[in-house]
Amino acid sequence: MCCLIADMGNSSKAIRTSLRRRGIARTVPERVDQQANRRRRGARGGRPPVFDKQLYKQRNVVERCFNRLKQCRSVATRYDKTATSYRATVTIAALLQ
């Protein structure tokens, strides 16, 4: 099963609602202010969103991959003009890393 794994910056109610309507599974940690607001509202605050810690830990692998690719100056600044040549640059950078 595929799942969207995002950071706390994408933790808004609107984003969660939009993903739920589209049937997209998601793992997004809830911000502290959102947790406090939900607790303050009590029973009307609703239940906390589902959050899988083990799945969220896998996000780090993708973040490190992007970080390694951006170490290559031509990938980070995108010197290439066409999408095809940029894709080739990213592929070569991934192979060399």
Image (cartoon, rainbow, N blue to C red):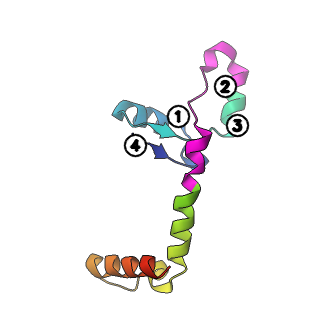
- Say above or below: 44 vs 73: above
- Say above or below: 21 vs 80: above
Q: Are marks 3 and 4 in contact (CB under 8 Å)?
A: no
Query: Where are the magenta residues, as a range?
Result: 38-59
**Residue named by callout 2:** 38
Spot occupied by residue 80 in the image (x, y as percentages of width and height)? 35, 84
Q: Secondary structure at mark 3?
A: helix
Q: Are marks 2 and 3 in contact (CB under 8 Å)?
A: no
Query: Mark 4 to mark 1: distance in Å?
Result: 21 Å
Q: Secondary structure at mark 1?
A: helix
- Say above or below: 47 vs 69: above
- Report the mark closest to the observer, 3 or 4: 4
Query: Mark 3 to mark 4: distance in Å?
Result: 28 Å
The amino acid type of the residue labelled 1 equals Lys
Quadrant in which the N terminus is drawn: top left
Return the disc, 1 or 2, that comes first in the chain's sequence: 1
Return the disc, 2 or 3, that comes first in the chain's sequence: 3
Q: Are marks 4 and 2 in contact (CB under 8 Å)?
A: no
Q: Secondary structure at mark 4?
A: loop
- Say above or below: 39 vs 82: above
The amino acid type of the residue labelled 3 equals Asp
Front residue of 61/79: it is 61
Query: Mark 3 to mark 1: distance in Å?
Result: 12 Å
**Residue named by callout 3:** 33
Query: Mark 1 to mark 2: distance in Å?
Result: 12 Å
**Residue named by callout 4:** 2
